[in-house]
Amino acid sequence: MNVRSLSPLLIAPMALMIALSGPAAAQPNARQSAPPKASPARGGSRDSMAIVAVVNGDVISQGDVENRRRLFALSTGMPATAEVLDRLTPQVTRQLIDERLKLQEMQRRKIVVSDKEIASAIEEVEKRNNMAPGALRNRLSADSVELRTLVDQLRVQIGWARVLRQVMAGGTDVSEAELAEQANLFKAQTGQPEYRVGEIFVPVSEPSKADEAKQFADAVIQQLRAGAGFAIVAAQFSQNQTALQGGDLGWVDQTQLDPEVLRVIKEMPVGAISNPIRVPGGYSIVTLRAKREIGRDMATMLSVRQVFFPFSTKLDPTNPTEQQKSVLEASKRLSANAKSCSDMEEAQKKSGSDKPADPGEIRLETVAVPALRQVLSSLTPGKASQPLIAEDGIAVIMVCSREEKNLGVPTKQELSDKLVSERAELASRQLQRDLQRRAVIDQRS
């Protein structure tokens, strides 16, 4: 085989292809922690044991603050210099106090979050940020951030959602009359603008803390605009109920946005990140992910099957190994002989790869890699693609079906979810204010 025969088929790294990477493997079980106590930071220095705050008798140490500051710096790409970390201290301390209040309420209600749930949440953060399984854990270790710091934060986020379900009780039930009202409202708004928005909410618990919150929000924005992932920053530092979803508010209309946020969103181009926006209870940082007209969002939806043949070593296109040559021949045979998506599924089972044959429904217009989007748009359903080569293996793709859909019309479930989400956010902020008023908090300088 001519060694150059692998080179012309190179199309894109596998990491950039639709969903050719399979579901992230579960993380090793994180230790189920008791109520977080003061714990030493690196080296267990005396300073790390210093008390920063006492919340209803629970201690927050300098080590806790140090780990959280470093976690934030790591996730946003900020340099972990003393000056930068000091600038983060006030808001990080407030966040730890709020989380401790939430944790105490969880314990009072006997709400337990399992290790499996924590591992799944870490997987989800990695998936949203295109990170390999285990990559987040490794990054924390490399930067001397205790895994416990992230685990404690996720535990509170997951448990707090359960607290809200208890508080709301029947508030999660949506009647047919309410759904009908929402559907009628939707019809009346058809053709009006609708926005896909991401939000990071930085709370201001009392007026004297507003400047600290604003400075923290400014630091967040600086790093987001420098390329930090919005979803991972939101998951760690947003204080609303969408944090675990990367701050994604979904599609919202003009009536669902704070007037100040709406004013900014109307002027933003897609992909932009706002300055801090003062809203009731704090500051919002928003990003505009997409916009459309309500009820009008035509899309080309594809059902796809894929087979991935892995290389045993990284590909050098000018000098492929015998194994890589063999894999190319196997992918060519599949491309020539596969006649149905069932054939593709059977081939994937024999390929030696754990990647899924079915990556899920794909919206053609959102496929980020132009070359791949062209392949998918030109493929006749039931016909396999030519081999698509990357440094870690070769993929063959088949389109099973292609359908034009209007994604702008919400289902009953989506309308119900929107109502419940709005109620949960209101309940969360009210309960947080109640906990803060009743708490005994000794914050030390």
Image: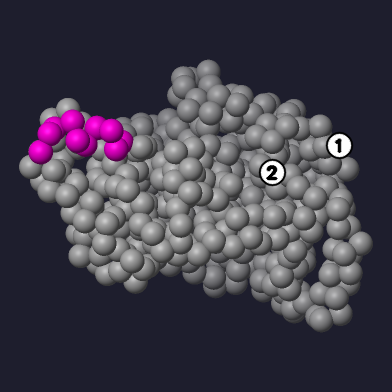
Give residue 215's quadrant in the image. Answer: top right
> Camera-side residue: 63 or 287?
287
* Amino acid at the residue labelled 2: Ala
Give residue 208's quadrant in the image. Answer: top right
Inter-mark Cα distance, 1 to 2? 16 Å
Percent x, y of residue 431: 74, 60
Q: Residues within 10 Å of mark 2 (few under 14, many from 20)?
A: some
Q: Earlier in the sequence, mark 1 or mark 2?
A: 1
- Mark 2 = which residue? 290
Q: Main secondary structure of the magenta part?
A: helix
Percent x, y of residue 352: 19, 59
> Camera-side residue: 402 or 437?
402
Task: Give the magenta range.
Answer: 1-10
Q: Residue at x 74, y 78 (%)?
A: 173
Q: Residue at x 69, y 55 (%)?
A: 298
- Mark 1 = which residue? 263
Give residue 28's quadrant in the image. Answer: bottom left
Q: Secondary structure at mark 2?
A: strand
Q: Residue at x 82, y 37 (%)?
A: 266
Q: Residues within 10 Å of mark 1 (few under 14, many from 20)?
A: few
> Camera-side residue: 379 or 68?
379
Q: Is residue 168 visible?
A: no
State left or right for residue 429 relative to residue 376. right
Question: Does residue 201 sit above or below 357 in this rendering?
Answer: above
Considering every residue shown, the one lying at the far right of the view is 188
Please check the rendered image and state whether residue 100 is part of the magenta-colored stretch, yes or no: no
